[in-house]
Image (tube, rainbow, N blue to C red):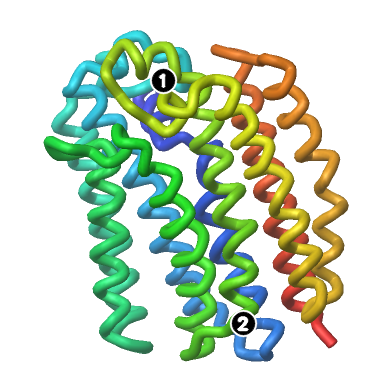
Amino acid sequence: MTGVKNWVRGARPRTLPAAIVPVAVGSGVAAGYREFSPWRAALALTVALALQVGVNYANDYSDGIKGTDKQRVGPVRLVGSGLVKPRLVLLAALGCFAVAGLAGLVLAALVSWWLLLFGAAAIAAAWFYTGGSRPYGYRALGEVSVFVFFGVGAVTGTAYVQMGRLTWLALAASVPVGLLACALLVINNLRDIPTDQESGKRTLAVKLGDRRTRLLFASCGLVPFAVAAAVAVAAPLALTTLIALPLAIVPVRHVAGGSSGRELIAVLGQTGRLQLAFGLLLTLGLTVRP
């Protein structure tokens, strides 16, 4: 059971809302147009979850073999802590990517083969975040990738595979989803600024510095509510996302108050709960439309 617990912890369950929420919101868009497909949504969720867990294992493997996780403050790392052999973590990552690829292949066969290009790009982005000789995650581009693939791409892609077309509503709804996904990465990178500086990782947080990274987190946590209010022009019940505002105030206040190190692990969980609550409320608002 200890081994199972290690694998579960290595998958980083607190990051899974980043995969669940965009699929839910994209499905909400499709449902609002009366074109929801449960099994296509299920396939899209399989792709998203497999990619999320895959990138977590791939990140664990790449950082572990490079030695950048030795002084890590955050959640346990399988390779860096010596709990699991690097080869096994690599195989787990590749297995997740294979599952995502297979589910994506089914969707592409049913909808459009060009989806394979997006799928290949998503897998490449997952691997090269910390993998390869020049990982872009070490060059302050991690947040951009998260916004594109776990925001815009995941929401519009989920809606597209069910509806067969792109809509402005899917694009608009993808913005707050992408920002909240970025919030998870920002809080991780804020926590790791000291160790990342020592190991040579030039994340966006390292480049911005502590104070500006805290402002960035506040923006990622609060701007989504303004965007949801704009979306309410077409989907009035999107305003129900304001119910989740207190869940945003708590982590923003902790970060603005100077929380650091292990204190930010709790903030990560709070941010995940915010993302999940906001996403479910936005999904409801997009589904029930006049």
Indicate whether 162 appears above or below 85: below
Q: Residue at x 41, y 37 (%)?
A: 11
Q: Residue at x 73, y 50 (%)?
A: 277
Which quadrant is home to the N terminus?
top left
Q: Residue flagged by tag 2: what amino acid is it?
A: Ala
Indicate whether 191 appears above or below 153: above
Indicate whether 109 appears above or below 134: below
Q: Residue at x 60, y 57 (%)?
A: 177
Q: Which mark is residue 247?
A: none
Which quadrant is home to the C terminus?
bottom right
Could you tell me residue 139's position as x and y percent? 30, 36
Q: Residue flagged by tag 1: what amino acid is it?
A: Val
**Which of disc 1 and disc 2 is earlier in sequence?**
2
Element carrying mark 1: loop
Q: Within 10 angstroms of label 2, few (less than 14), some, or many (20 or more) residues? A: many
Which picture quadrant has residue 53?
top left
Q: Within 10 angstroms of label 1, few (less than 14), some, or many (20 or more) residues? A: some
The residue pinned by badge 2 equals 30
Relative to 70, is 190 on the left or the right? right
The residue pinned by badge 1 equals 76
